[in-house]
Amino acid sequence: MSRSTRERIIDEALRLFAERGYSATSVAEIEAASGLSPGAGGLYRHFKSKYEVLAAAINEHASRTRLQVAGSLAELSSMEASVDLEERLAHVCRAGLAKVREESELTRVFFRDLSQFPELVAVVREGLLQPMFDAIVTWFQAQPEYRDVKLDWAGIATVLGGSVVHYRLFQETVGELPGHAEKDQFVAAWVRLAVGLLPSPAPVS
């Protein structure tokens, strides 16, 4: 499906912000990348300013994330009965890795430019990051294997979710895999740690 002009502006602006930085990207460059005549003011038919384009990109990514999280939880819930716990856990981990990778452009903009826009940092925190961590808590508490296990699920989500985010961020910022661990290694280790949250069976007397 073809993108609207507004969507092209948002997508191309975010790509340019990620590549060059917000300050180093001009409105004319965004217009040219979006298929508009550079410098002719086409961007201003859709947005009041370059800042408004950035804010729209971040808000739309946040809205999309909330929908994706809800969809992922629904999909995972539907597979519970027929799939063993380790496979379910691996699916959760891979979904998280894919989501962080999907947001690679936004991640670069976040670290390079968003400190000057605290209101947009709040959107990233509450609209992208927190829903992912909340989803981990919701998912674990819904699994029959963990349902009666009394643990600090918010803390566990911080550790397990944080490791997923860190794996991709390390790749983005350093240019290689953390610990030289391939994705399948990481997922397998993540699953082992999550399975280890289950209490050991009581000894047979």
Image (spheres, rainbow, N blue to C red):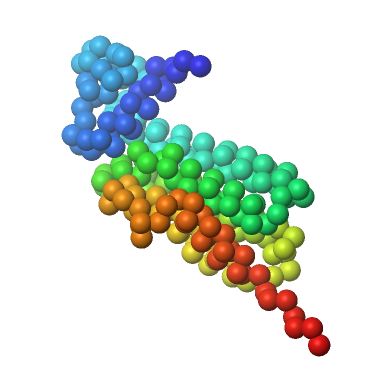
Answer whether residue 93 is visible to the viewer in this image. yes
Answer whether residue 122 is visible to the viewer in this image. no
Horizontal placement of 143 versus 194: left or right? Answer: right
Q: Position of residue 67 (x, y in %)?
A: 58, 38
- Residue farthest to the right, as pictured: 205
For the point 71% across and 45% down, which residue is it?
A: 79
Image-quadrant location for residue 113: top left
Question: Along the line of sight, which residue is nearer the eye, 110 or 1?
Answer: 1
- Residue farthest to the bottom, as pictured: 205
Question: Along the line of sight, which residue is nearer the eye, 11 or 94?
Answer: 94
Image-quadrant location for residue 37: top left
The correct choice, above or below, for 198 with respect to 181 in the image is below
- Residue farthest to the left, as pictured: 24
Question: Along the line of sight, which residue is nearer the eye, 136 or 178?
Answer: 178
Question: Along the line of sight, which residue is nearer the eye, 187 or 151?
Answer: 187
Horizontal placement of 63 versus 91: left or right? Answer: left
Q: Position of residue 80 (x, y in %)?
A: 73, 50
Horizontal placement of 24 versus 34: left or right? Answer: left
Q: Quadrant of the C terminus?
A: bottom right
For the point 36% across and 60% down, which residue is it?
A: 179
Q: Position of residue 17 (x, y in %)?
A: 27, 35
Image-quadrant location for residue 137: bottom right
The correct choice, above or below, for 111 with respect to 31 in the image is below
Label total for image? 0
Q: Position of residue 198 (x, y in %)?
A: 66, 70
For the point 54% across and 45% down, which residue is it?
A: 95
The correct choice, above or below, for 184 with respect to 42 in the image is below
